[in-house]
Image: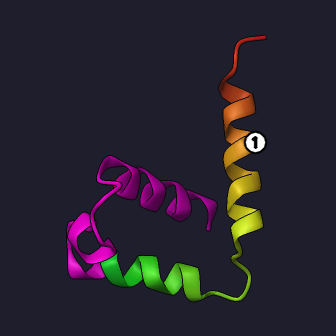
Amino acid sequence: MLDRDCLIQERLSAQPNASIPHASESWSQCKATYRLWDNPKVNAEGILEAYKSSVRLELPR
């Protein structure tokens, strides 16, 4: 699930002012975004924590 979220975040951050349908390259990508966010296991805190963890891994020590 984290991999899909990363792909979605990359796509949406490339066009931050675009709607989800416009930022998606296809209808299936658009639908996948809505399905991911509709998943009861997915919440804003979890997405943010995964992002923070990935940034920490990339920071130089």
Crowd rating for badge 1 (residues with CA inside 10 Å; few <14, some 14–19, many 20+): few
x, y percentage for residue 48? 70, 56
The colour scheme used to paint the residues is rainbow
Task: Kindly indicate the quadrant of the structure image that contains residue 34.
Answer: bottom left
Residue 24 in the magenta stretch? The answer is: yes
Please identify the residue farthest to the front as the structure is shown: 17
Question: What's the residue at 49%, 86% (across, down)?
Answer: 35
- Residue tagged 1: 53
x, y percentage for residue 14? 32, 48
Amino acid type at image mark 1: Ser
Q: Quadrant of the C terminus?
A: top right
Q: Residue 22 or 3: which is nearer the viewer?
A: 22
Question: What's the residue at 29%, 81% (across, down)?
Answer: 28
Question: What's the residue at 21%, 66% (across, down)?
Answer: 25
Q: Report the side of 48 relative to 3 (left or right).
A: right
Is residue 45 depicted above or below 36 in this figure? above
Question: What's the residue at 73%, 43% (across, down)?
Answer: 52
Task: Kindly indicate the quadrant of the structure image that contains residue 19.
Answer: bottom left
Q: Which residues are magenta?
A: 1-29
Q: Report the side of 55 relative to 24 (left or right).
A: right
Task: Kindly indicate the quadrant of the structure image that contains residue 22.
Answer: bottom left
- Dominant secondary-structure state across the stretch colored magenta: helix
Callout 1: helix, strand or loop? helix
Is residue 41 depicted above or below 47 in this figure? below
Is residue 30 depicted above or below 11 in this figure? below
Q: Quadrant of the N terminus?
A: bottom right
Residue 23 in the magenta stretch? The answer is: yes
Q: Residue 26 or 49: which is nearer the viewer?
A: 49
x, y percentage for residue 39? 63, 87
